[in-house]
Amino acid sequence: QVRLVESGGGLVQAGGSLRLSCVLSGGTFWRYVMAWFRQAPGKERDFVATISRNPGNTAYADSVKGRFTISRDSAKNAVYLQMNGLKPEDTAVYYCAAADDFRPAHLVTETNKFDSWGQGTQVTVSS
């Protein structure tokens, strides 16, 4: 059974940076499209970024384009989310997700495409 463990969340001032990490165990890492979603209080869980089996193939939500970067490291079974230029509206619980999927990143952006989820890590951006 696939297990995902996130880390790296915290409190940061607006304009600051954070790097989230997610380590996958119990599965064959290269098979998975990996993604980050986020959920603010009282809101739905929203897509942030995906990266396909090909590490050069990524997709981003419009709200984070140019500020966030998703990457993966097969040697560590890990996916990362580098977040720069953080804004108060980025405050949310961030979830890592995995899908055993061969398609390009932009076709795997909906929550129902993913069957493995981490426990989430809180990101709080103060103004």
Image (tube, rainbow, N blue to C red):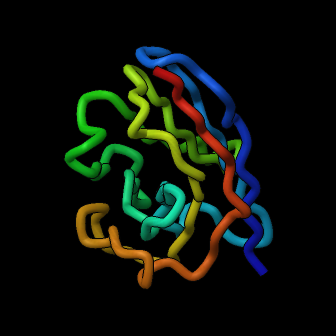
The residue closer to the viewer here, 88 or 82, is 88
User: Please, is residue 32 above or below residue 124 in the view?
Assistant: below
Drawn side of residue 80 relative to residue 105, left or right: right
User: Please, is residue 4 above or below residue 69 in the view?
Assistant: below
Q: Report x, y in % for residue 71.
A: 47, 40
Number of marks in the rendered image: 0
Q: Which residue is drawn at 31% across and 61% down?
A: 105
Q: Report x, y in % for residue 109.
A: 33, 68
The residue closer to the viewer here, 62 or 82, is 62
User: Please, is residue 57 above or below residue 66 in the view?
Assistant: below
Q: Which residue is drawn at 42% across and 26% down?
A: 86
Q: Report x, y in % for residue 43.
A: 44, 66
Q: Residue at x 28, y 49 (%)?
A: 60
Q: Report x, y in % for residue 21.
A: 65, 41
- In this view, the residue farthest toward the left is 62
Drawn side of residue 78 relative to residue 94, left or right: right
Q: Residue at x 53, y 59 (%)?
A: 41
Drawn side of residue 119 relative to residue 31, left or right: right
Residue 8: quarter of image: top right
In the rendered image, the quadrant that contains the N terminus is bottom right
